[in-house]
Amino acid sequence: MEFDKIINSRRTARNFTGKKVSQNEIKKILISGSLAPSAKNRQPWKFYILNDGQKNHITNMLFEWDKLNRKERTSVKGTAEQIKLADKMIMIYSDTKKEHYKKPDYLSLGCAIENMSLQAIDLGLGSCILCDTLYIENEIDDYLGISGLEQICGFIIGEPIYNYPRKMKKDLKELLLN
Ligand SMILES: Cc1cc2nc3c(=O)[nH]c(=O)nc-3n(C[C@H](O)[C@H](O)[C@H](O)COP(=O)(O)O)c2cc1C
């Protein structure tokens, strides 16, 4: 796909056909992430590819959390519904070593995650970055046996159905400070 087309057609995928995402497609997406720039070339990203059982378990944990915390009016329930529909989910972690590295490492992670999103588009797939998982980050990390890493987000992938409106984007004029 042409670069402009990839950039313009990228949008968050919230509904999916259920078609399987292959191991090869997952590998391509992760390699694209790993080629991103990073502060001091630290490449702070780590990926955990969930199997179906783990994905279902985390989905249920989010539904449970939502039930117990309805008053908080979060988007957790919607996020859990999206995870259920997506074929694959990856948890993304940072292995930041020093407090001072945190901010640049977050930026590096963002670069990697956007590479992953764009690679998914080029493969005819859709993805959604999920920070709602952070409401239960400790529970997820305990369940997966992850320690010593900082959870950044979840990332779901599948064949998208875009049956909802595109998000409006601000005009460049609004963004320019001078
Ligand atoms: C850091 C980050 C965290 C996000 N977390 C969630 C989430 O937890 N649940 C969700 O449904 N969407 C999540 N999104 C998707 C955003 O809602 C989406 O990118 C935004 O509404 C703009 O829509 P677009 O991606 O289609 O342009 C997240 C996006 C980013 C960049």
Image (cartoon, grey):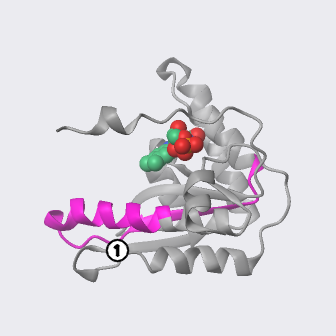
Q: Residue furthest left?
A: 100
Q: Quadrant of residue 40?
A: bottom left
Q: Which residues are magenta?
A: 85-114
Residue 25 placement (x, y as % from top left)? 71, 75
SS at badge 1? loop
Q: Up-down: is 96 above or below 171?
A: below
Query: In this view of the protein, which residue sits in the foreground, 77 or 158?
Result: 158
- The quadrant of the picture occupied by the C terminus is top left
For the point 31% across and 61% down, the residue is: 107
Disc 1 crowd rating (10 Å Cα; few below 14, some 14-19, many 20+) is: many
Residue 117, position as x, y percentages in the image: 56, 61
Relative to 140, 108 lies left or right: left
Ligand 1 within 8 Å, label 1 CB: no
Q: Is residue 131 visible?
A: no
Please give the residue where the numbered disc 1 appears in the rendered image.
44
Q: Amino acid at mark 1?
A: Pro
Give the residue furthest to the top: 71
> In the depicted view, which residue is nearer to us: 109 or 138?
109
Quarter of the figure with residue 149: bottom left
Q: State the residue at coordinates (68%, 59%).
A: 157
Say if the magenta span includes residue 106: yes
Instruction: Identify the residue shown where x is 48% and y is 36%.
Output: 169
